[in-house]
Amino acid sequence: MADKRTIPILYTAAEIKERTEAMAAEIAKVMPQEFVLVALLRGSFMFTADLVRELYAIGVHPMIDFMTLSSYGSGTQSSGTVVIQRDISEEVGGRDVLIVDDILETGRTLAFAREELLRRGARSLKVAMLLEKPGKLTVDVKADFVGFSIPDKFVVGYGLDYANHYRELPFIGYLDVH
Ligand code: IMP
Ligand code: MG
């Protein structure tokens, strides 16, 4: 386990806050008055908590629900198969949905969530991603709102983990694993 005090920082807490505030404004412009925000756990928990407070500050009040998906095993390589570990409790049929997730890499997690929510009858579906790693998509999906496009590094912190560690870091850093 790398010493958490020496993790190289990619984005500071202040930079994340500034970007999250701007993203909330972009989202407010596009989303309808009422919508269901579906956060994909566990990686998006911190981003979601901050994003909804920024939305609140500008008068946007979504219903909020959580879906726990898993594609990675315990390391840094995706297993490729996405499973629902815990489902949302809201009905999304006929409703406008905003998916919130931590990072877009191959796109398999997002493609799975999109297809599942559309299959349940979501009327419209948009996606807010904290991070994306350009050039790594293996399926045809995209995010409507992106926080930061990052270099091809394994990032941790601000909700993102390595073997369920580092989620508590208030900044986004990276590990030298590949
Ligand atoms: P995808 O399905 O390949 O797009 O991967 C998306 C999921 O993989 C994210 O929701 C993360 O949980 C995880 N992931 C991908 N890249 C990283 C990373 O650099 N750090 C931590 N988790 C990652
Ligand atoms: Mg993860």
Image (tube, rainbow, N blue to C red):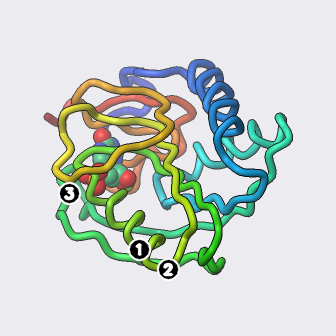
Q: Which residue is mark 2?
A: 120
Residue at 46% in and 38% down = 157
Q: Which residue is mark 1?
A: 116
Q: CA distance from mark 1 to mark 2?
A: 6 Å
Image coordinates of residue 32 in percent, x first then y, are 71, 51
N-terminal-most mark, 2 or 3: 3
Q: Which residue is mark 3?
A: 78
Specify whether tag 3 is near ligand 1 (CB below 8 Å): yes
- Is residue 94 or residue 117 the one in the foreground? 94
Residue at 85% in and 41% down = 59
Residue type highlighted by circle 1: Glu
When the figure is inspected, residue 51 is found, relative to residue 96, above or below; the finding is above
- Is residue 134 or residue 122 the one in the foreground? 122
Query: Which mark lies nearer to you, 2 or 3?
Result: 2
| Residues at discs 1 and 3 in contact (Cβ within 8 Å) | no
* Label 3 environment density (alpha carbons within 10 Å; few <14, some 14–19, many ≥20): some
